Image: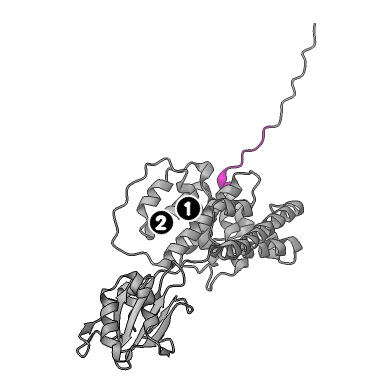
Amino acid sequence: MAKRSLIVMKKKKTRVTRNETFLVNFKYMGDEPVFTKPLDNLDYAKALNWYNTMCDLKECREFLDTYLKNSNRFVEAKRINSVPDSWFNVSAAAISRLLSKGYVIPETGKTFLESKIKMMLSHSTAPVEKRENKTNVISIQDRIREKTQDIIGDIEQAIDSDEKFSLYDWLKGRSIPATYCTSIVNYYAPWLGELLEAYDGKCPQLKEAYSYMTKKQLKERIDFINSLLEDAEKYAGVAKKTRAPRKARPLSKEKILKNFRYQKEDNTFKIASVNPEKIIGAQELWTFNTKYKIVTVFRAIDRGGLQVKRASITGFDPNTSFSKSAGRSAEAIIQKIQSSGKLVLRKLMDEMKTDKVLQERINENTVIMRVV
């Protein structure tokens, strides 16, 4: 009779339920942490470690949903509910729980939360609802803060893609203004400090918070965060040096002529000034001082033409610009200035023999005779 082979039965593993796991963790982790003062980096890391260990995904979703609804962000709350579990960020939910309880956390935590909310919304399967037009005007500071959160959120998403990442190339490829590099450094610098303390092992809380990482992994993370800070600082320095200088906004003619004083009309010689706005950009200007009977001609030094600076004429060629006394022939000279062509005007100054110092400034005794 053939012997029956013995069948070795494997010992059945005892199934550990969530409640049993929770009780085991609770023995070492204790109740949900309570704080009576603003959280420093150590308290902040300890709190995140507790929520990551003690709370399941369903509870984390409830934390974030409550936070968004309390902040009147109902549209975002609805969309995040449709985010797949693989894209839901538990750390962001833990931060939202701390904020919902009214705790004061490090500023980097709020920035991290908003960046992760943006990342989760990008993976939402719910349709985007059109927002109603708001009449409230967003301040420049709020725009910068919102833009900073968007940039850091995009950086975090690029890092999570597991592809080789260079922050310098990323910033350069998107032409990010150097202003935002300071916010990027402020965001990652505290994290680097925590990692360094955890690597040294002198702080029990941080050592426990990063116990899931080996020494080698901590070293690699420290090197990576340090490279982000160096890239941000290098890019900021290069961007500032290569930034094109801001073009000065051209002033209106009204502002240029704000302090320009001239004689609008003279009853003795029966003459009146032309519009002084014509001087700006003109190639030639003729003026007459009614008090001293001095004729002055300004000729532009280049195609840019003559300009006005307060009460003075600028942009003229000192070699071809003159002031001469009209003397007794003042009325005849005035007549020629008003009615003669360019050829006559070129030789007109030669008819006056008495030279005067060039009258660069225009005053209440000066009539603007002609602009060419």
Query: Residue, x 58% and y 59% (percent of image)?
Result: 48
Question: Where residue 137 sits in the image (x, y, percent)?
Answer: 33, 65
Q: Is residue 257 magenta?
A: no
Q: Are marks 1 and 2 in contact (CB under 8 Å)?
A: yes
Q: Is residue 339 above or below residue 271?
A: above
Q: Is residue 307 above or below residue 23?
A: below
Q: Is residue 349 above or below residue 187?
A: below
- Quarter of the image with the N terminus in it: top right
Mark nearer the N terminus (1 vs 2):
2
- Quarter of the image with the C terminus in it: bottom left
Q: Nearer the viewer, residue 63 or 256?
A: 256
Number of residues whose C-alpha sits closer than 10 Å to that of mark 2, classed few (under 14), some (14–19) or many (20 or more): many
Number of residues whose C-alpha sits closer than 10 Å to that of mark 1, classed few (under 14), some (14–19) or many (20 or more): many
User: Which element carries disc 1, helix, strand or loop?
Assistant: helix
* Helix, strand or loop for the magenta stretch, by majority: loop
State the scheme by which the image is colored: one colour
Horizontal side, residue 47 vs residue 100: left or right: right
